Image (cartoon, rainbow, N blue to C red):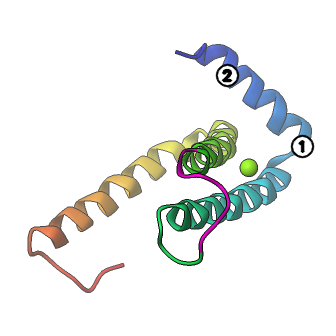
Amino acid sequence: MIDEQKYKDMLSEIIEHYGLYAQFDQLVEESAELIQSINKFKRSCGNGQPVEINRLRALTRVLEEIADVEVCIDQIKLHSPDNVILIDDIKFSKAKRQADRINGGTQNDT
Ligand SMILES: [Mg+2]
């Protein structure tokens, strides 16, 4: 387990130092790295052009990039705590829409 308060204190320090817009830029960069790592992991599993990295190392890289993305998102949420409730509401409605689709509900929404 991580020390949640220490983690939040560090995130606050980082976003105060760099600013919100710089951390949005960082999120874009980390998201691109996550996409690339997922593609490489899939290739390490035999989907597409072969890669030299083994499957375990490729999976570890995906996990590292997920952590990088989450750190950026956590910073942005800390910077805008009022939006966290809105984000949670949107997450719930999107998950519900997907579940409804699986269960034969609407299929035209994105
Ligand atoms: Mg990264």
Amino acid carrying mark 2 in the image: Tyr
Q: Quadrant of the C terminus?
A: bottom left
Looking at the picture, does residue 13 appear above or below residue 63?
above
Outermost residue toward the left in this view:
104
> How many other residues sit within 10 Å of disc 2, few (<14), some (14-19) or many (≥20)?
few
| Residue under pointer 2 | 7
Q: What element carries label 2?
A: helix
Looking at the picture, does residue 73 appear above or below residue 38?
above
Comparing labels 2 and 1, the label whose residue is closer to the camera: 2
**Where residue 13 sits in the image (x, y, percent)?**
82, 28
| Residue under pointer 1 | 18
What residue span does the magenta drawing correspond to?
Answer: 50-56
Outermost residue toward the bottom in this view:
108
Report the residue at 54% width, 48% height from top: 59
Give whichever of 67, 57 is nearer the camera: 57
Q: Is residue 27 left or right of residue 93?
A: right
**Where residue 51 sits in the image (x, y, percent)?**
64, 66
**Where residue 19 sits in the image (x, y, percent)?**
86, 46
